[in-house]
Amino acid sequence: MAYISQQLLNMLQLGSIYAVIALGYTMVYGVLSLINFAHGDIFMVGAFLCFIAAGKLHMPFVPVILVAVAGTALLGVGVERFAYRPLRDAPKVSAIITALGVGVFIENFTLALSPYPRHVPEILPVVNWNFSGLTVSSIQVLIVALSIGLMVVLDFIVRKTSYGMAMRALSWDIKTLPLMGVPVNTIVALTFAIGAGFGGAAGTMYAMAFPVIDPYMGIMIGWKAFIAAVVGGIGNIRGAMLGGYILGAVETLATVALPSTYRDFVAFTLLLILLVFRPNGILGVPKTIKV
Amino acid sequence: MRAALNKLNLYWDALMSRRYLLFVFAGVGFLATIVVSRYGLIDQYVELVAMYVGINIILALSLNLVNGYMGEFSVGHAGFMAVGAYGASILSVKVFPSMYSMWCFPFAIIAGGVMAAAAAVVVAVPSFKTRGDYLAIVTLSFNMIVKSVLENIDFVGGPRGFLGMEKLTTLPWVFAWTAISIWAIRNFVYSNIGRGVLSVREDEMAGAAMGVDTRKVKLLAFVVSSFFAGVAGGLYAHLLQFISPRTFDILKSTEILIMVYLGGVGSIAGSIAGAVIYTVLIEALRVLGMWRMVVMPLLLVLLMIYRPKGIFGYTEFRWFKPATRKKKVSAAKPCFVAIEPERTVQGGDILVVEGLTHYFGGLCALSDFNLRLSSGRIMGIIGPNGSGKTTLFNLISGNYRPTRGSVKFDGIEITRMPPNEINSLGIARTFQNIRLFNELTVVDNVRVGMFNAVDYNATAAMLRTRGFNECEAEVTERAYSLLELFEIGRYARELAKNLPYGMRRRLEIVRALATRPKLLLLDEPAAGMNPTETGILMELVHRLRDEFRLTVMVIEHHMSFIMGLCERIQVLDFGVTIAAGVPDEIKNDKKVIEAYLGKSGGNFRTNTGTTKNCRTPKDGPTDVGQITPEIAQAIGRQAAPVRLEEGDEKYGRLHIDTVDKGKRLEGIKKAGYAGTDDFIQDIASNYDEIRMSEGSRLMLIKKNWKDKIAVIELRPCEEDDYYGITTAGIFRNDYAKNRTLLWDRGASPIAKPEQSGPLPYVTPKDAQGNNALRTGQSNASDNIISKPAEPVKPSAEAEINGNKDVL
């Protein structure tokens, strides 16, 4: 029983991190129909900012996460401004390739600056609570609570505020929106800022849970979070959350039932099977093509 | 100097026309590589880099086939490479006897390629259901799965990697395989199947409608591509003599992608250039140490920004294009299947439609449609916009599957057949919004139409057999003669997108004829034509029917065209047949007149989005001029209301109302100004805002196809003011009286005069006295906002007298 609860907790923790990263993918995709392949690396930058703030500058927790979020948000906006915006009217593929290029650039830039894996120090003192065999660490609670808080805030922003309205409108028709008096570039920048900021927050959480970080860590985790976004229905915010938790659950289960090397195999096979039956993801809506 | 240049140019042309030199170079190159590697004439490092270049060329070419020629987006090519590498290595290490490894090597490589191709079939079957980013996700997962599986197989070393291969990959081998890949992929692309693949990239739906079995060609291209990726993998494994699952991770896939897009998609020369530049640059930048991997992606991003199509991008080096051969024997037509299909006897029912019904969600687009069409007849389908005409065509041609009902063609039930099968039975169509294969030449557009007339397979195409050559010559000759017949032969080598509008319409008909149909469906063929052109078209359709012994169905809005052409007409309104008969009956049918003009004769009919058939008889702007049937039909029911936020006085800034924001926009979107997108963008990019009075409604009116008339009317609910936007400009509702043109499109720097159509709100008389408006030439300083982004401020000076011919 305790074992099962423990695993459930692990699922929740991993799923939260995936969900928060997946949100970044899905927001950008939802608004610009662009798969932002650099997002996994923005997540990595978030973890490294956390390392710098906590390990080098010895900041306490709140400033650390603020630095990570603000830094990545800035990075996201910069990437949009200088790499994606010039290509907004170009073929979609060019933008995707640019995204790949930006990703590789960020990875290797970080690698050139910091060629070795880094160890992130403990930012908050870890407290373990014991409930009849079930160990709950304060970090796990923090991660889950923080992620859920972030998701609620995002859901609110997108559904209830005028900026969120503009984002949703943007996904419908980027050509008409300026006609309605909406400053499109600001909205796109805001979307990237929020998406990348979420990546930064996820990076911090990840660094707290798994303290060894390296410049290439964003690749695999980023792709997986992308898969999570697809499973939920890419472009759909609640879908991304759902996908994140599903992926967290599947991976945890796979590690429990099989040798850990089968984890990726199970996760991706599941994705393929799911896509055969639901090509648009769980919450996605199929696009109809007009003749 | 110039003479010398000209001379040089001549030499260059002469050299380029000698395509066989390519084979000479290939042969000499191959011998050279043998000599070089046998006697160690070049530095080992240079030789190694050269081999990397060769392998990368194969990889880039194979990926280009999928991403460039087919227009899909595969991101996991390293997965297929891995299958080939491990497959070939297992064979050469564990299966083939090591003493004969030299002789077994090519077989190992081929087997690796075959294994990769088999894997491709497994991947392709689920992933070709839909387009878009789907294949990207599936191939990505495939790459990850392959890596994960390999890590878990101890037999091949698991995560530690696999070694024991001899260094069998040598420069001559790499050269030979590279040459074979270039040749085979080039042959594949320049064949019937290749044209099918290209048609998928350009417009999959149009391809299917022209009889291309899109699933088959996509699968074939994918399999061929994976085969060569596998070959490259095998060569790579026997060069490195060590492979591990990590070798083939997503970074490797990214590398191949970069090579393809660097060189340019859809071009063999591009792939070669991309692979060479990338490989050499990576080596040359070694001096930068760790920073070279920072510089490389930066260069890529810059290249994408300044040259999004890559270095070559859809253009091809002349030597890689096959020569157009003249046909030698004209009598024998060995490969054409069924050259003249037997026509049904005149008089029999060629098309029988019974109870055909189609729903889009809750909207009934076509309801209980019945039709018996005799062979050899010309029939017209008319009705206001949104009445279900095009839906009917889509159902007959297989683009939509009906909710209920059946379609029989020539006695065969075709109700749920895929479009390409329906086409090969003998139904061809054109599209309302012209769907040509824009990046293909005119003659290739026609040759795609002959997809099913060709009788050779992919292997024959790749090997360029004799049968293939004869067949291609035949197809080409027929394509040219068809083009000549319709007098567009002189455009044959032009890209379809460069044709003038009328020619594009005509080419679409020729392309449809190339499929040798018995029944031709023409969807608004006369749209955008002037009376003379319409007359010519009418003659053409008659000629088609007589010379090609066709049965023709036409959707059209030009009443004179329909009445003059058709022997029978059926009228649709809201998906329901409201009349059928000979032209004279239709002309005088009360219901038909009502459907076109509305009940009170001259009012707009609007659909408010929530209620169907909602009519607003009261506030129709009848004062602006006569509403002719053309206008009435142009308006159709594509209108949607938008409430405005409490705004500034007269020209309140247009906001979307605070309740239901998302839905409002959606409402506009659905109202469908599909054809006016460009125009709206045009305005949007020149104005920060469009100002409207509070409580105004935005009504979008479109005509059925792009770039002709786009009217956005800002219409009052309570007040008297509203503003109309047309391709000519933005004007006020009192236009007829005062001619207040707020913005003249003709005067703006982005204007394209040929696009400005007649103003639908102007009576013919008005239009006559106002040439400037029609031609778009006017004096900007008078009353027009000539500077973009300046708010519209109508002043006393801005309103000029109606008789003045300035504007």
Image: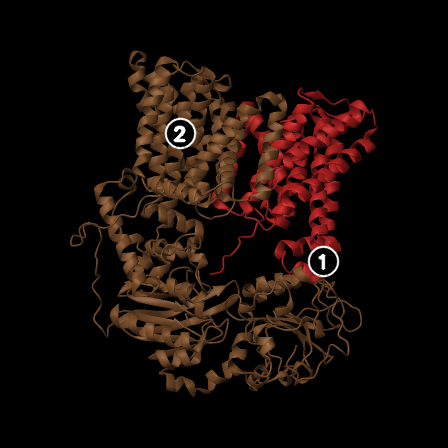
Chain B, colour shown: brown
Coordinates of residue A285 in the picture (x, y in percent) = 56, 52
Distance between the alpha carbons at the discs numbered 2 and 1: 50 Å
Residue B676 appears left or right of B381 = right
Residue B346 appears in view: yes
What secondary structure is found at the residue carrying circle 1?
loop
Coordinates of residue B228 in the picture (x, y in percent) = 38, 32
> Pointer 1: what residue?
A182
Q: Compared to A25, does B770 lie above or below?
A: below
Residue B628 appears left or right of B649 = left
Inspect the image, locate mark 2, and give the three-letter code of the amino acid beneath it.
Gly
Q: Nearer the viewer, residue B563 or B749?
A: B749
Q: Which mark is residue B230?
A: 2
Inspect the image, locate mark 1, and give the three-letter code of the amino acid beneath it.
Val
Q: Residues within 10 Å of mark 2 (few under 14, many from 20)?
A: many
* Res A58 → quadrant: top right
What secondary structure is found at the residue carrying circle 2?
helix
**Which residue ends up furthest to the left in the rendered image?**
B331
Q: Residue at x 52, y 23 (%)?
A: B246
For the colour red, the matching chain is A
